[in-house]
Amino acid sequence: MNAQAPTRCVLDTNIVLDLWVFDEPKAAALRTRVETGISGWIATAAMREELARVLAYPQIVKRLTARALPADTVLAHFDRLAHLQPDAPKAPYACKDADDQKFIDLAVQHTAALHSKDAQVLCMKKRLERCGVTLNPVDEHSLGRVV
């Protein structure tokens, strides 16, 4: 693969929270790849709406407050880094969690890597591979860390 060409990726809401709310150390390599443009994050308006809704959940507000991090700052990361796409058509495989379907649909449409920790998505790994989607790819340059 050409090192200059960004790889497309879809980040589910929990991964976005790991990157910019929880500052999860295991997500540092992915955050760097997205922030530097090595990975081209694609998303939809519905994904942004979900993120905005989740940022208002009491447990997330508590975390944001503890870090003195306004929800608008997290949304600004989304607005600055995510390349908005139209909603994708339904993928050949349905997720048991309807909230996760939009991430699967977009990843399948664009043959993009999908980053998720959701059990309902993780159990679809082989089906997603049939559609050309890599679930939580590992970057050989990040010593096995998920990117």
Image (cartoon, helix red, strand yellow):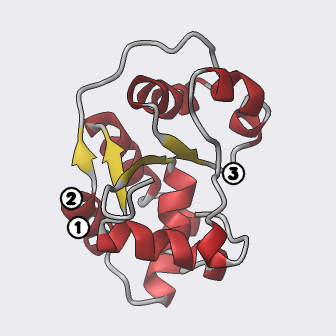
Q: Which residue is mark 3?
A: 117
Marks 2/1 in contact by CB < 8 Å: the verdict is yes
Identify the residue shown where x is 26% and y is 62%.
Answer: 81
Identify the residue shown where x is 73% and y is 71%.
Answer: 144
Q: Position of residue 5 (x, y in %)?
A: 31, 56
| Quadrant occupied by the C terminus | bottom right
Residue type at mark 3? Lys
Local crowd size for mark 3, using a 10 Å CA cut-off: few (<14), some (14–19), many (≥20): some
Q: Quadrant of residue 46?
A: top left
Observer-nearest of 65 and 73: 73
Residue type at mark 2? Asp
Q: Position of residue 94 (x, y in %)?
A: 63, 15
As drawn, the residue found furthest toward the front would be 2
Q: Is residue 20 visible?
A: no
Q: Looking at the picture, does residue 93 appear above or below residue 106?
A: above
Residue type at mark 1? Ala
Q: Looking at the picture, does residue 39 appear above or below residue 28?
A: above
The answer to whether residue 120 is left or right of residue 30 is right
Q: How many marks?
A: 3
Q: Which residue is mark 2?
A: 79
Local crowd size for mark 1, using a 10 Å CA cut-off: few (<14), some (14–19), many (≥20): few
- Quote the CA–CA distance across marks 2 and 1: 5 Å
Observer-nearest of 11 and 53: 11
The answer to whether residue 7 is left or right of residue 76 is right
Q: Looking at the picture, does residue 41 appear above or below residue 22?
A: above
Q: Quadrant of residue 32?
A: bottom left
Observer-nearest of 50 and 114: 114
- Quote the CA–CA distance across marks 3 and 1: 23 Å
Q: Looking at the image, tell me whether mark 3 or mark 1 is earlier in sequence order.
A: 1
Q: Looking at the image, tell me whether mark 3 or mark 2 is earlier in sequence order.
A: 2
Q: Secondary structure at mark 3?
A: loop
The answer to whether residue 147 is left or right of residue 107 is right
